[in-house]
Every structure is written in C-alpha cells, then in structure tokens.
Image: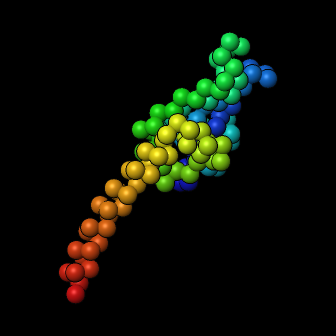
Amino acid sequence: MAVKLRLVRMGKKKQPTYRIVAAESRRARSGAFLEIVGTYEPRGISAAQPETVTKVDNDKVVRWLLQGAQPTERVAKLLKTSGALDAYEAAKPAKVEKAAKPATKTAKAAK
C-alpha cells in the first residue's frame, strides 16, 4: 500500500481550506484517508490576518515519513516551513544506524 501525504480540499466556494492527510495513493483527492496530520489555510483566518496559516503535527508527520509515506510537492513545501522535514532528517539517521548494527553482526558471524 503506497501512502502519500497530500491535501484534501475543504471549505466554501472560493474560500478553500485544506487538510494535510495521510492517504492511499490510489484514493480520490477528497476520498478516504488514514489520518489527519495538519491543516493549511492559504487565505488566512480573517481579513485582519491575511497571511497563510499552517498547523502541522510534526510527530505524526515524522512517523508517517519513517514508514515510507511520500509527500506531494506542495505538502513538502509546507512541511519544510513547519520544521517537520528537519525533524524527519534528524530521526532518519538514528533509524539507519539501528538497522546497520545487526547487519554487521550477521556478516561477522558468517565469516
């Protein structure tokens, strides 16, 4: 099952808000998803605050990325601004080192 981190459109006509979700890649854009990991409001909360608002649960994103989920281009940009990709890069080498230790033991045992 290929999992993607992508946007699901919500909101009213001409006033979109998006959820950042983990979903199977074969599902429709607004179809079933596995988990909500954040929100993105490109138009801001109100006219008084026009800048974009992004809320991302970095722990959930890192967990999905470690399991092999692939973000879309737009979601990757949002995750970079939220700091989730930096947290993933920091967590990724720790996982690789753990996997490398048992492999070296089995290689020495085989000799």
The image shows a total of numbered marks equal to 0
Q: Nearer the viewer, residue 13 or 46?
A: 46
Please indicate, yes or no, whether residue 107 appears anywhere in the rendered image.
Answer: yes
Q: In the figure, 84 relative to 90: above or below?
A: above
Whether 94 is drawn above or below 106: the answer is above
Left or right, residue 96 beside residue 2: left
Between 37 and 73, the one nearer to me in the picture:
73
Q: Quadrant of residue 53?
A: top right
Residue furthest toward the bottom?
111
Query: Where residue 6 sits: x, y (%)?
Result: 62, 42
Check the image and report above or below for 60 versus 26.
above
Quadrant location of residue 54? top right
Residue in the image at 66% along x and 16% along y: 49
In the orientation shown, which residue stands out farthest toward the top? 48
Residue at x-position 33% and y-position 56%: 94
Rendered location of residue 87, percent (x, y)? 43, 45
Please indicate whether residue 106 sits to the left or right of residue 23 in the image. Answer: left
Residue 99 x/y as whole percent: 32, 64
Q: Give the quadrant of the C terminus.
A: bottom left
Whether residue 17 appears in this view of the structure is no
Q: Position of residue 38 (x, y in %)?
A: 54, 32
What residue occupies the far left of the structure in this picture?
109
Tell me which corner region of the image, top left, top right, bottom left or bottom right, holds residue 95. Answer: bottom left
For image coordinates 26% across by 67% down, the residue present is 101
> In percent of the image, x 55 and y 43: which residue is there?
80
